[in-house]
Amino acid sequence: MLGLLVRATFTYVFLLLLVRLSGKRTVLEGTPFDLVVALVIGDMPDDVIWGEVPLAQGIVAMGALVLLHTTVVYAAYRHPLIGRLVGSRASRIIHDGRRQLAAMARERINEADLRSHLRSHAARGLGEVREVHVEPSGALSVVRVERAKPAERRDLSRLRAALRR
Amino acid sequence: MRHIVAIAAATLVALVANAWFVSRGIALDVLVPPPAKVVRGFVTALAAGRPDRARDALSEPARNEISVDRLRWIDERLRNRFGVYHVVPLETVVREESATTGARLQPGRGDPVHVTFSLVRERPARLWKIDGLGSLEALAGDHAAL
């Protein structure tokens, strides 16, 4: 039981250290591959904690994976060419309110998915949307047409100025 | 760049500390899997049709003696006799650098069978390794005589 406690504590501290050192990207705003790496790393401590593998193997496996991934992410940040090789670019699936069918097919987003995403961005239809991008993280970003944007403080100032006239 | 160096350094420090503890025989029960886990891992790999992986659990002399084909043969014999099988480690007796683990081979059909595994600590990693498959081979061999 004491061994389990020691292994669990060590694994917790070591993982905490690796995640802190690797930066926030591994768990937030990452690409789908960041998620895969996070899942693989998340699966490793299990065997170490239960004593199925030597502690040294766990250290090497977790350390090597985090090191490799952080190196690749850093290289992608420093060199756009590597960034293009290991990552992906945002793709525009709506332009000027019109669907870009080839891009939608490439991203495997059908009409129902698109409408669902638009609703989650409080857009009632394509008429309110200027552009929709599928970001490298897989999230959809929506740029609305001017008239469909929510009111801002400056709109109130404009309205007051117009009323005064 | 500092992050990469820091991750490499943290991993290296953890490995060196682990090696230091292992070399001095401190907290070995924490740092390496106990004999029961080694036995279970070995039989699980064997029953899963991974004799190459099972062979990693053998000590060097046993590895020289027992080939992957031999392990495959043992697995086939056990499967023919017991159907799907797994092992439940029972008691382990540790004597310094050697150990004996008794286990219950739980067959898919028929009664459980008691088997024993002798293990040795292999240097320099001080890992427990299975030194012989006496009773398991006998079980497989018995079937040939049936």
Image (cartoon, grey):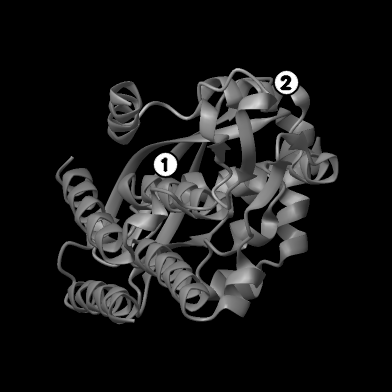
Rendered residue at 29%/49% (across/down) = B93
Tell me the residue at 85%/45% (across/down). A102
Query: Which residue is identified by label 2?
Result: A112
Query: Please, what is the three-letter code of the amino acid marked with disc 2?
Result: Ala
In the figure, A123 relative to B46: above or below? above
How far across and how far down the image is residue B106, in percent? 57, 28
Marks 2 and 1, how far apart at CA: 60 Å
Tell me: B102 left or right of A123.
left
Which residue position holds label 1? B102
Residue A135 is situated, as x and y percent measured from the top left of the image, at 58, 49
- The answer to whether B6 is drawn above or below residue B119 in the figure is below
Q: Secondary structure at mark 2?
A: helix
**On what subunit does the disc labeled 1 rest?**
B
Above or below A165: residue A84? below
Quarter of the rendering containing residue B120: bottom left
Which image quadrant is residue B108 in?
top right
* Residue B95 in view (yes/no): no
Left or right: residue B14 versus residue B8 is: left
Q: Along the horizontal axis of the image, is B91 left or right of A108?
A: left
For the point 60% across and 17% down, which residue is it? A124
Q: Alpha-carbon neighbours of circle 2 within 10 Å: few (<14), some, or many (≥20)?
A: few
Around disc 1, counting alpha carbons within 10 Å, would you say few (fewer than 14), some (14 to 19), or many (20 or more)? many
Closer mark to the observer between disc 2 and disc 1: 2
Can you say which quadrant of the picture contains the C terminus of chain B?
top right
